[in-house]
Image (cartoon, helix red, strand yellow):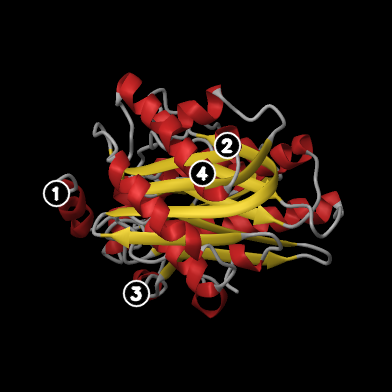
Amino acid sequence: MKSICAVEGVTAAGIKEGRYGLTLIKASGTAAVVCTQNLVQAAPVQLMREEPDPDGRLDGVIANSGCANAYTGERGYADARAMAALGAEALGTVPSRVGVASTGVIGRHLDLDLIHDQCRRIAPSLARSDDAEEAAARAIMTTDLVEKHALVRGSTFTIGGIVKGSGMIAPNMGTMLGFLYTDADLSRPVLQAALTGACRRSFNRVVVDGDTSTNDIVFLTATGLCGAPDPEEFTAALDALCILLAKQIAADGEGATKLIEMRVAGAASEDDAESIARTIVGSPLVKTAVYGMDPNWGRIIAAAGRAGVVFDPENVSLSIGEGKSLCPLVDRGGIVAVPDRAKQAMAGKTVVFDLDLHSGSGEATAWGCDLTEKYVEINGKYTT
């Protein structure tokens, strides 16, 4: 199985009707959650923060697409609670043990009658199969062009996840919507710490368009059916899973044709490296240069310079590509670029940059995508 349904104790179902979809995932266990840091928070995010299960457990999630239920006031909060109740009825539990998530247009109220009807129709089809998880992944898609699944197997456990995200992507928490599951047995503090760290090293380093969503939320549930894992092995596996999903989000950015991978090394700290990497992949000038296959190294150096990090611009090295396509652009501040060769290194679906500041041991990688005319077309007509 592709991802979540490969985890012991997880079943899923989903339905997509036009722009409106609904996903149900059933899995009981200890849970951790990370939410958006946007000041404007959707009602489901508020609900998950303000009314968490006192035992830190979930029995499943319910998620809708097409309507974000964000900036909807008291009615929106009541609607989020109603969604939790609908999920609880379908999953055979109580509302406090149901994770709620929404994605879609901001400032519009949920159609609870439709959600109730969809929930009633798909609950009997909850299953542990490829078809079930594919339906669940499709149901939460909005402008996404592809489903996003990932699976990592440890020595004694499995971790799987599905996410959605294509636009309004500059997460400052974890992911857009993400549902991660493991059959490992872990305490809630350990699970929360692992998820928070993994989000920082993966989803928080993805920039499609520089906008942080009102609805970003990621759940991680541990069913515990395969026993306690080695904590370090689990943390490494969760990091790997989230990076796989983060790269899928970046590659499917709205209107994108290329994935950008920005590696920064030689910084004074990991935080400095992360700030520079995120600033570069978020630069519209870098993004358009990648789209046009223009190896404009000056835009990358300039973006690094506005990241709020102190370094010596005359002592950096920059290259593009990897392996046989590796092409140096700057060496210790000196321009060594061969334009034709550098342009050729940008021809594939993935464009890799390596920037070495030569000032420390801090390193970080961030991911983004190119910026095309299609992005404007998609977002100029999003609500119509």
Name the residue: 48% across, 37% down.
84
Task: Identify the residue at the far bottom of this view.
Answer: 324
Give the foreground label among 4 and 2.
4
Q: Which residue is mark 1?
A: 381
- Local crowd size for mark 2, using a 10 Å CA cut-off: few (<14), some (14–19), many (≥20): many
Amino acid beneath label 1 = Lys
Q: Earlier in the sequence, mark 4 or mark 1?
A: 4
Mark 4 and mark 2 in contact? Answer it, CB < 8 Å: no
Give the foreground label among 3 and 2.
2
Mark 1 and mark 2 in contact? Answer it, CB < 8 Å: no
Alpha carbon separation for disc pair 4 and 1? 36 Å
Q: Where, by quadrant of the figure, is residue 95 drawn?
A: top right
Amino acid beneath label 2 = Val
Name the disc covering residue 340, or none: 3
Name the residue: 84% across, 49% down.
231
Q: Nearer the viewer, residue 89 or 221?
A: 89
Q: Position of residue 56 (x, y in %)?
A: 69, 34
Mark 3 and mark 4 in contact? Answer it, CB < 8 Å: no
Name the residue: 70% across, 56% down.
182
